[in-house]
Image: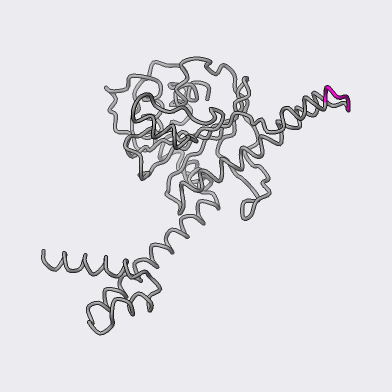
Amino acid sequence: MISFLNAILRLDRDKINKVEFMDTQLSIHAADLLILQMDIHAKTESGLHINVEMQGWPNTFFKERVILQESAFLCHEKTLFDAAIREKFSTNSEMDQAEREKHRYEIPHVYAVWICNFDINGTAGYYDCWNLYSEHNVLQSAKGEAPLPISPKVKYIIIDLKKFRKKESELKCDEHRWLYLIKNAANSTKLPKFHDSALDNAVRRITVNTKRDKKILEDQVACTMTLDEQMGRLALARVEERESLTRRHVENALHGNVLTVQQIAEYNEVSVSYVRKVKAEMLASSKK
């Protein structure tokens, strides 16, 4: 984990030397998010809290889910941060009260790492970093240097494995090697020798005999599909089915040439612009 985090967070300085694995199930007091189940919850010796998520399927509102989960994670870590401050400055003296008040709005460092095996819209490459920026500074950055985030304490590292296409001969750093391993481990009959103790140990630990260890593989597949992910897949399937059915209804109505665009939109509970878009696509298709 130390090797992976140093690589994926691109830490050239202040590298992680020690990591502690924390509870991955957190109680969150927010609507419809009572339990936050994380894949990995790690804390470094410098106090950096990291949530690592492996996502194999695009849930509905994926980007909002990332933001919501990180916000809940931040609130949870802020609660622990405040408890530590209260313990350190526990008396009712003016000095301790002033210290507690000074840290009222201070937040801990929380990073989220999402490794996704699907296309993420809006990302050109396989690696993206989401931060909170000032719009003014972003506009000004077009004239000079890149803008700095509002706070360096909250960061989202988004990895799109679909866009990671490096071959074995192109692996130039630990970041490349870890992502190559994660992407290819399930499908490769033989992974390369990385000549790195952390990576080679990882390969050794995950290597199984597909015939002899078939039960292990089946159990692993079953346990990696969380209830949340199952619900997400079902919700996405329902949305896609509803969208497909609605489009068929709109197309059939347009073929009939009986109803107006406005009437078709009202009947199918869609916008007029959507009906016009479908109509334009039908005309373009018929010309082909």
Q: Is residue 225 left or right of residue 143?
A: right
Q: Is residue 122 above or below residue 243?
A: above
Asked if 23 appears above or below 278 in the picture, the reply is: above
- Which one is nearer the viewer's eye here, 137 or 96? 137
Residue drawn at x 62%, y 20% is 46
Q: Residue furthest bottom?
A: 258
Towards the viewer: 50 or 142: 142
Residue 156 location (% of width, % of height): 49, 35
**Residue found 51% across the figure and 32% down from its top:** 155
Q: x, y (%) of residue 182?
A: 41, 33
Residue drawn at point x = 65 percent, y = 36 percent = 23
Q: Nearer the viewer, residue 152 or 116?
A: 152
Magenta-drawn stretch, dominant element (helix, strand or loop): helix
**Residue at 51% in and 38% down:** 53
The residue range painted magenta reads 92-96
Q: Is residue 36 above or below residue 100?
A: below
Query: Picture coordinates of residue 91 (x, y %)?
Result: 87, 26
Quadrant of the rendered image containing residue 49: top right
Dividing the picture into quadrants, the one containing residue 268 is bottom left
Q: Find out whether residue 72 is within the magenta segment.
A: no
Q: Can you say which quadrant of the picture contains the C terminus?
A: bottom left
